[in-house]
Image (spheres, rainbow, N blue to C red):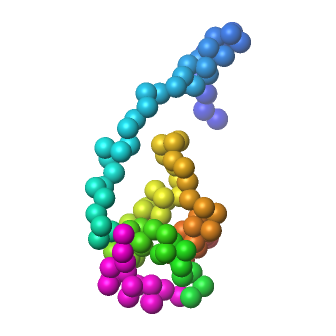
Amino acid sequence: MEYIPFEKVSLPEAKAALDADLTPKAKVNWEQFRRPQNPKSMILTDHAVKWLFSVPREILPKTLAREYPRIINYIADRWETPSACVAYLDELLIDERGTRQGFSQKIVFELNRLKLHLAPLE
């Protein structure tokens, strides 16, 4: 068995170290990282419509297509590359920023069904 090094610290020192990790980080203006709004992104592309017709009925993201056509367009473009599509779905489902409003429960359910279809749990 290998030796695990450790350093003895007092309870106040340990608390101070933990509290230091909880200090608020500088707020990032995420607006500057967003793709510019494009009126065309608010409608489904022909490719996305074809993709929607090809998706198995049990995972068809109807609400997502109605409320967020730009996301459907993006998913449709990446669907043939499962790893890229799953990575994008993870970006949508996991709030790395800590400031996102989040999707409705129905949208989250549809996103998860798509992800599970591409990358089933083992």
Quick one: which residue is furthest to the right in this view?
11
User: Residue 52 placed where, x, y %?
Assistant: 45, 84
In this view of the protein, which residue sits in the foreground, 63 or 113? 63
Compared to residue 20, the image places residue 78 above or below, namely below
Quadrant where the C terminus sits is bottom right
Q: Is residue 46 magenta?
A: yes
In this view of the protein, which residue sits in the foreground, 24 or 20? 24
Residue 4 visible in the shown view: yes
121 left or right, relative to 38: right
- Numbered label tally: 0
In this view of the protein, which residue sits in the foreground, 37 or 27? 37
User: Residue 6 placed where, x, y %?
Assistant: 61, 20
**Residue at image x 53%, y 42%?**
98
**Residue at image x 40%, y 35%?**
28
Q: Is residue 62 magenta?
A: no
User: Residue 4 placed where, x, y %?
Assistant: 61, 27
Quick one: which residue is furthest to the front in this view?
39
Compared to residue 90, the image places residue 58 above or below, namely below
Residue 115 visible in the shown view: no
User: Residue 15 placed where, x, y %?
Assistant: 66, 16
**Residue at image x 53%, y 88%?**
56
Magenta residues span: 42-56
Residue 74: quarter of image: bottom left
Residue 38: quarter of image: bottom left
Magenta part mainly helix, strand or loop?
helix
Quadrant where the N terminus sits is top right
**Residue at image x 38%, y 43%?**
30
